[in-house]
Image (spheres, rainbow, N blue to C red):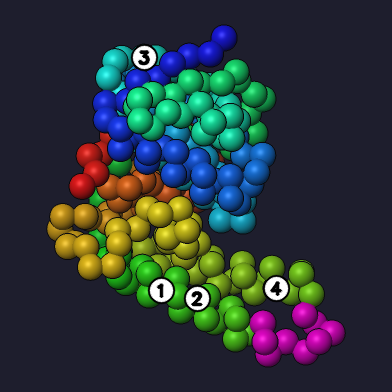
Amino acid sequence: MTVPLHFAEGREAAGIAAFLARLIHYDRAAAVRLQAGGGALAVFGRPPSFEVLAVRTAALLDDTALDTTVSAGELLDGIEEAAGKAIVPAPVTGPPWSGLLPPRGGWREVPGLPDAAGLRGAVAAAVAEFRARDEQLPPQHRTRAERDRIGREIWSRALAGTGLPLRAAHAAQALGFLPPAGAVPHEVPVVLLSAGPWLRLRTPYGSVAVRTATGLGKLGVTPVRRP
C-alpha cells in the first residue's frame, strides 16, 4: 500500500528529489530509510565508498507518521515537484545500516570546524594528493588494493583536530550539502555536532553523520529552513 506525502513547499520536494538523484548516481540500487512525524520528514541514505550516513529533511503539511525503508529510485519516481507531493513506494528489506541511526537528541556543538570554504579547500587538497600519489605508483603497484589503501589513509584523516574524518566533508560536497561559494557564513552556517559516539556535519542543505563507536538510536527530523 502506497502512502502519499504532502510537502509544505515545492522546493522541499525538489530538495528531496535532488538528494535522491545524487544517491542513485553513486548506487543505482540505493535504498533510503524514511522517518516522518510532527510535520517533518527525514530521508537517510548511505552513498557507497564514503562510509557515512547522509540525511536530508523536509517540512510536511501534515503530521503523517512513517518509518519505512524503500527504493530510492522508486521514491524519486513518485515525487511530483510541481504538486509538492510524493508517493511512498512499497517497503524493501533494509540494508544493515538502516537499523543503526544517530540519536534523536543530546547533540552539542564541537568547535574548530573550518567554514564551508575551508572544507572545500581541504577536499580539493585531498583529491590532488590522491592523484599525485597515484601517478607516482610504479606500474606493478598501481592496483585497486593499493589505490584503496591510499584513499583510506587520506579520507580517514581528522579535520582540524575535530575528530571528523575528511571523508565526511567529501561526502557533504558530493551530495550538495556544502553552501555555495560566496555564501555568507553566518547566513548559511556549517556546524559540527556530537552525541555519544556520533559526529554530525550539519548545514542548511543536509547532514552527514559518522559513527565512531557502537551506538543505536534515531536522528531527529526537525527540518532546517533553507534560504
Q: Which residue is mark 4?
A: 147
Circle 2 Cα neighbour tier, 10 Å, few/some/many (<14 / 14–19 / ≥20):
some
Q: Amino acid at mark 2?
A: Ala
Q: State how far apart marks 3 and 4 are (Cα).
A: 46 Å
The correct choice, above or below, for 49 with respect to 98 in the image is below
- The secondary structure type at the circle numbered 3 is loop
Contact (Cβ within 8 Å) of mark 2 with mark 1: yes
Q: Residue at x 67, y 25 (%)?
A: 93
- The secondary structure type at the circle numbered 2 is helix
Side (left or right) of 194 relative to 31: left
Is there any visible trace of residue 102 in the rendered image?
Answer: no
Q: Position of residue 110 (x, y in %)?
A: 28, 55
Q: Position of residue 39 (x, y in %)?
A: 28, 21
Q: Which residue is mark 3?
A: 64
Contact (Cβ within 8 Å) of mark 3 with mark 1: no
Looking at the picture, tell me which residue is in the foreground, 148 or 128. Answer: 128
Q: State how far apart marks 3 and 1 are (Cα).
A: 40 Å
Q: Residue at x 15, y 58 (%)?
A: 186
Mark 3 against mark 4, which lies toward the viewer?
A: 3
Contact (Cβ within 8 Å) of mark 4 with mark 2: no
For marks 4 and 2, the one nearer the N-term is: 2
Q: State how far apart marks 4 and 2 are (Cα).
A: 14 Å
Q: Position of residue 168 (x, y in %)?
A: 46, 58
The correct choice, above or below, for 208 with respect to 133 in the image is above
Q: State how far apart marks 2 and 1 are (Cα).
A: 6 Å
Q: Amino acid at mark 1?
A: Ala
Q: Which residue is mark 1?
A: 122
Start-end of magenta stretch: 134-142
Q: Residue at x 44, y 44 (%)?
A: 18
